[in-house]
């Protein structure tokens, strides 16, 4: 399944340097990325999007206009110099292009796959005003995959002899660890699970983000000198204050939002109803889709309903199709236009057989005498005025109740932070939902020398926004360590 664009060579003056470029004949359209056929991919957990070849990457990179004032950079939460790395691709200086990306982004192979570029950097691309924007995410993925294939040994700076503890090995924690290690600080990351990556490991299915890619990015961070300690639940084994007393100069909390929300309707405790968290952990960490190689099967039956409209809901639905469901229907209480999931993932899911029922919401679950789920009652909604989320509020239509048979329900309506650290850290200010309050541009908390970022400070959000918060916190921590005159004994 390879697509090769029609290309030609040309010479073009750019920033005072003449260089050779691949140029697509149709400059208004981006170079499409090959994908597995829907009928084939729904039978496996292999990557759906297959990435760019060198020829395709060169053709797509040639579409960049190298704007004097690049608006795309303003849309990048981590501030990558996008025109610079794309220009280096056109010059076939791939190692330099990778270094340019990694100046700002420590997880490019991950971001190139799962970041919502269409509403961030690509949204501001000038090309998009008269055609399709440059596929910045596809080019970032191309470079990162090439780097993984060829290997990368980063230079390690002299040690500053300052120690930082990072709690949580998700996107924000990994970013903080990498950024501080690049400066020379000694970083130890504490992770409660047995796998490193947080939501990257347990939340995103293999067909969107292969775990070997996550592991490759983690290995890069290890080569920077970062130490990882798994199966360590901070708040239980050690408190935050104990970490500070044990010789760490600062602590960063990036524990994410892993506590599932439920609907709070009758019958929600019936067997056959999963939170998306549990379902995806069974799929991703416990490898249920590889039964009997892994003795952790997950049985979904024939009829599956997924409740929710975000990327987690879509991931759950697509996973259910792959583990044997005959029909999967997504229930979302608003309209399709208001779904927070990426359009690309919605389209992929529908190609694979997902059906969607919009403006519909469950009201109760029905079960048999053994406590097993057998059906679901739901109502139709209409959309009212805008609510605090900026979307129209769903309003139940009286008398619209209907009942359907269902074998499994997966509830994917969001997650909140786990409160363990909040409850064991004296003086830590939080909201009523357990969200840690921080200074916006520094990540500083109400506790001295303690910083936080990512979903634990915002509620469930995107991976790249968590990384952006991690970068800000790392800068703030480094500034504090430079100001501090006290050298801790290691």
Image (cartoon, rainbow, N blue to C red):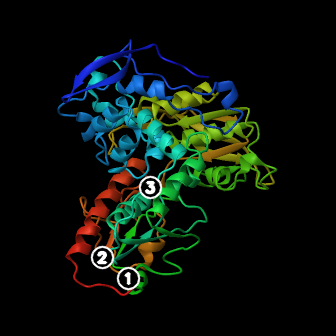
**Mark toward the start of the polypeptide (1 vs 3):** 3
Residue that label 3 marks: 171
Residue depicted at x 35% and y 71%: 185
Question: x, y (%) of residue 320?
Answer: 67, 40
Residue 143 image-quadrant placement: top left
Q: Tags 2 and 1 in contact by the CB under 8 Å rule?
A: yes
Question: x, y (%) of residue 213?
Answer: 55, 48
Q: Is residue 367 visible?
A: no
Question: Where the N terminus falls, by quadrant?
Answer: top right
Indicate whether 278 appears above or below 486.
above
Disc number placed over residue 152 in the picture, else none? none
Q: Report crowding for label 2: few under 14, some 14 to 19, many 20 or more residues within 10 A (C-alpha).
A: some
Residue depicted at x 40% and y 55%: 459
Q: Nearer the viewer, residue 333 or 208?
A: 208
**Mark toward the start of the polypeptide (2 vs 1):** 1
Residue that label 1 marks: 244
Residue that label 2 marks: 449
**Mark toward the start of the polypeptide (2 vs 3):** 3
């Amino acid at each position: 399944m390879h697509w090769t664009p029609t290309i030609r060579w040309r010479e073009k003056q750019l920033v005072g340097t003449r260089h050779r470029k691949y140029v697509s004949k149709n400059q208004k359209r981006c170079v499409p990325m090959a994908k597995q056929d829907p009928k084939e991919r729904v039978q496996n957990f292999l990557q759906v999007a297959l990435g760019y070849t060198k020829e395709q990457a060169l053709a797509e990179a040639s579409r960049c206009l190298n704007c004097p004032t690049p608006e795309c950079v303003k849309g990048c939460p981590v501030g990558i110099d996008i025109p610079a790395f794309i220009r280096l691709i056109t010059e076939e200086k791939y190692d330099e292009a990778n270094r340019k990306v990694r100046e700002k982004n420590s997880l490019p192979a991950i971001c190139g796959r799962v970041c919502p570029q269409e509403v961030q950097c690509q949204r501001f691309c000038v090309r998009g005003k008269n055609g399709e924007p440059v596929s910045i995410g596809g080019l970032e993925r191309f470079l990162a995959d090439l780097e993984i294939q060829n290997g990368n040994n980063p230079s390690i700076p002299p040690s500053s002899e300052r120690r930082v503890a990072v709690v949580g090995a998700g996107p924000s924690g990994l970013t903080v660890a990498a950024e501080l290690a690049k400066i020379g600080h000694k970083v130890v990351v504490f992770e409660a699970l047995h796998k490193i990556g947080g939501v990257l490991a347990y939340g995103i299915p293999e067909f969107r983000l292969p775990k070997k890619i996550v592991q490759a990015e983690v290995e890069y961070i290890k080569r920077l000198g970062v130490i990882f300690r798994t199966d360590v639940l901070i708040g239980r084994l050690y408190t935050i204050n104990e970490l500070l007393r044990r010789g760490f100069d600062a602590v960063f909390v990036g524990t994410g939002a892993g506590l599932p929300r439920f609907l709070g309707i009758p019958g929600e405790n019936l067997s056959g109803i999963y939170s998306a968290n549990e379902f995806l952990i069974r799929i991703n960490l416990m490898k249920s889709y590889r039964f009997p190689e892994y003795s952790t099967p997950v049985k979904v039956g024939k009829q599956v309903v997924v409740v929710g409209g975000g990327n987690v809901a879509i991931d759950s639905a697509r996973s259910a199709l792959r583990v044997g469901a005959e029909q999967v229907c997504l229930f979302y209480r608003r309209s399709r236009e208001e779904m927070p999931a990426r359009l690309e993932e919605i389209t992929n899911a529908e190609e694979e057989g997902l059906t969607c029922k919009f403006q519909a919401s469950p009201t109760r679950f029905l079960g048999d005498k053994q406590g097993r789920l057998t059906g679901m009652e739901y109502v139709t909604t209409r959309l009212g005025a805008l609510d605090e989320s900026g979307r129209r509020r769903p309003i139940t239509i009286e008398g619209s109740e209907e009942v359907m048979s269902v074998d499994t329900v997966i509830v994917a309506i969001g997650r909140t932070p786990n409160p363990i650290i909040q409850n064991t850290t004296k003086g830590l200010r939080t909201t009523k939902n357990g969200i840690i309050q921080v200074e916006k541009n520094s990540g500083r908390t109400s506790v001295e020398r303690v910083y936080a970022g990512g979903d634990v400070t915002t509620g469930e959000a995107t991976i790249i926004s968590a990384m952006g918060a991690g970068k800000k916190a790392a800068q703030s921590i480094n500034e504090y360590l430079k100001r501090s005159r006290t050298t801790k004994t290691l």
